[in-house]
Structures are given as structure tokens and as C-alpha cells.
Image (cartoon, grey):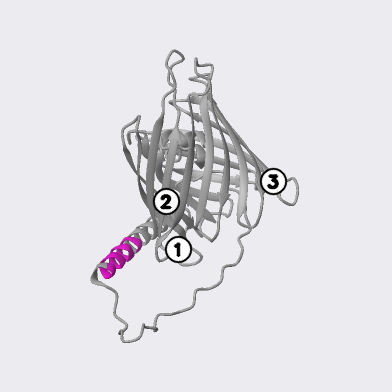
Amino acid sequence: MTCVLAIATGFLPTIALAETTPTPDTAGISPPNQDASAPSKETDVTDAAIELTRKQARSTMEWLAKGVDGWFGDIPFSQGGAVTDGEIGWNIFKRTDQDATKGFRFTARFRLPNLESKKYIFVGRDDRQDVITDRPDTFSRQQQLLRNGNTDNSFFAGVGAAFLDTIDTRLGVRGGLKPYAQARYKTGWQLSERDSAEFRETLFISASDRLGSTTAASVTHAQSATLAYRWLNVATATQRSRDFAWSSSVGAYWIPQARKQLALEMIWSGVIGSDVTVADYGLQTRWSQPVLHEQLIGELIVGHFWPRSQGTEPRHRAWAIGTDIRIRF
């Protein structure tokens, strides 16, 4: 059974990556009249710090996984238990019309032998509203370089179950032991050899929003083995606000190699029922790739937006920049 730590949802285009040619091993080759030298002390210190962080993160996650798995039975964790796809990250974002914000996120997968294959435990730290409403990653506050003042970031945990590969239910708590529940239906269609579509409907209930729903639909066209285009639309409504918060994006995604991606996206967002239907729109580009070896991943986001908060106010401009560093363990 697989348990997901920190929910990371979204509609990423499915692209078959072309095989890359292995880089020749030149570790023992030196230029004429020059001896092969050992790595610098600065490199040794950096590598040691990254490796120490990875080991500490993995040991902490394994300790947590063993403890949680023990709640559900007596099967030893060593018999099929594992922590995989672990990642921790730090980010900082700044828009010229808002204060800078810093964040911390983590994610991992738990394989717990005492749970059945369709049940899982989830735990993580992320933006409160993004977690409860189950909005795709493209429209998260982090990806849109929006300020949350860190006040909306909180830890969450819970139990979930999957049915028929299309239905997923979750019962969890977030910061302050405030409960929430979700039920998600997700399906997709292969429209042609290069075109696909995906639909997702999430019903949720919480003390702050009461009953609500998030509807997401996307269409993806694979231009080639490394290039895809996607149109994504999302709408969220809650019983408390009674208005529809909507977002739409059109993007191109180039993936030359595994864990390398260049994205160019045009994004619109707003609230139906307010005096400004399109409250914010802009263009942003994202580039992510390994920075040191294959364990440290860096991401840079640059965007230019045209927000408008009131119908009586003119639309103004705002530049934005953000960076994200993630360590895999």
C-alpha cells in the first residue's frame, strides 16, 4: 500500500521522453601537464551537508512510517515497508505589488505493510486553502507567486481510501486539529494518438468553508516526445462564499530530460459575482533542473501580471520572481 505525504495534485502533461545518450566517464582523464585533483573543500562541505540532510529526512520519515504502521497491525515494517519518492523543499517568492513570502514543503510516499492496498495515510505541510479545496498545482498560491504571509501554511494529516481507480476519499485534520473531508472523482480519455483529456471533481467540507466543490478539466496535446501543450480550467465554490473562484491557463511544456522542464504559461483568475470578473492575469515561465548531482533540484519562476482589485481602479502591472530548492531522499 502506498501512503502519500503532502498532497501534490495537478494535471501534468504526459510526455514520452526520448532516451538520452549517457555522458562518457572522464573521471580519470586530465589535460596534459595537469594532475587530476581532488574536489575542493567547498564542494566537499556542500556535498556533506546535502547528504546529511537527506539521511536525517529519510530516518525521520522511516521512524514516522514505522510508528504509524504499528497502529494497524503486527506485521514488521521490514516486511514490505518502505519510504520512497521523498522530497523536502524551501521557497521564496516576491511580487512587486506584495510582500515577499517564504515557505517550506515536504512530500514522500509510505509503503505500509499493515494497511490494505487501497488505504493510505497522508501527512504534510502546505497552504491550507490549496489542501482543502484540492486545486491543481498550476493554480496553487505558490505557483502563481501569490503572497500568503505564511499564515495559511499548516500541517495536515489523515486517512484515505481509493476505490475503482477513479474515486478517492480523505478524512483529515489541519493546523489546530480542525477537521475536513474530501471525496474526489477523477477520470481521463485518450482522444487521439496525441490528444488526451482529464476531468476531476472534488467535494469537500470544513468548518471554515462548510460544503464546497472544485471542478477541474484539462486538454493536453503532445506535439512531440518532449513538447506538449495544455489548456486547464478550474472552478471552486463554497457554501460560505457562494461565489465561484475560477482560474484558467494555457501553457507549453518542454521536457528535454527527466527532471528537467521549461514551462511557459498564460494564467487568468477571478471570482464570478464580484465587480472584477478577471482579478488577475499574467504570463509566467518556470525552469527546473538538477543543480548538484541528481538529489538537489532547483526551480526558477519569473512572471509579469496585471492585477485589478476593484472595478473602479485601473489595472496595474506587477513583476514577480520566485525560487524553489528541493532535496530528494
Q: What residue is disc 2 on?
A: 299
Where residue 188 appears, as percent x and y from the top left, is 68, 44
**Can you say whether 68 is above or below 284 in the image?**
below
Foreground tag (1 vs 3): 3
- Residue type marked 1: Phe
Front residue of 252 and 77: 252
Q: Are marks 2 and 1 in contact (CB under 8 Å)?
A: no
Q: CA distance from mark 2 to mark 1?
A: 35 Å
Camera-side residue: 21 or 160? 21
Query: Is residue 33 visible to us here?
Result: yes
Give how far across and how far down residue 325 sits, in percent: 37, 52
Task: Point out residue 107 in the picture as x, y percentages from the top left corner.
Answer: 43, 51
Question: Would you name the residue on which mark 3 appears?
Answer: 196
Callout 2 amino acid: Glu
Viewed as shown, does residue 257 lie left or right of 30?
A: right
Using the rendered view, name the quadrant where residue 319 is placed.
Answer: top left
Name the amino acid, label 3: Ser
Inter-mark Cα distance, 1 to 3: 39 Å
For the point 29% across and 80% down, the residue is: 37
Give the number of callouts: 3
Q: Is residue 140 magenta?
A: no
Is the residue under label 3 in contact with that under label 1 (CB below 8 Å)? no
Q: Which residues are magenta?
A: 43-54
Residue appearing at x 25%, y 67% in the figure: 42
On the image, which quarter does residue 31 sit in?
A: bottom left
From the viewer's perspective, is the residue at label 3 or at label 2 nearer? 2
* CB under 8 Å between discs 3 and 2: no
Q: Position of residue 246 (x, y in %)?
A: 54, 28
The crowding category of the residue bearing disc 3, from other C-alpha atoms within 10 Å (few below 14, some 14 to 19, many at least 20), is some
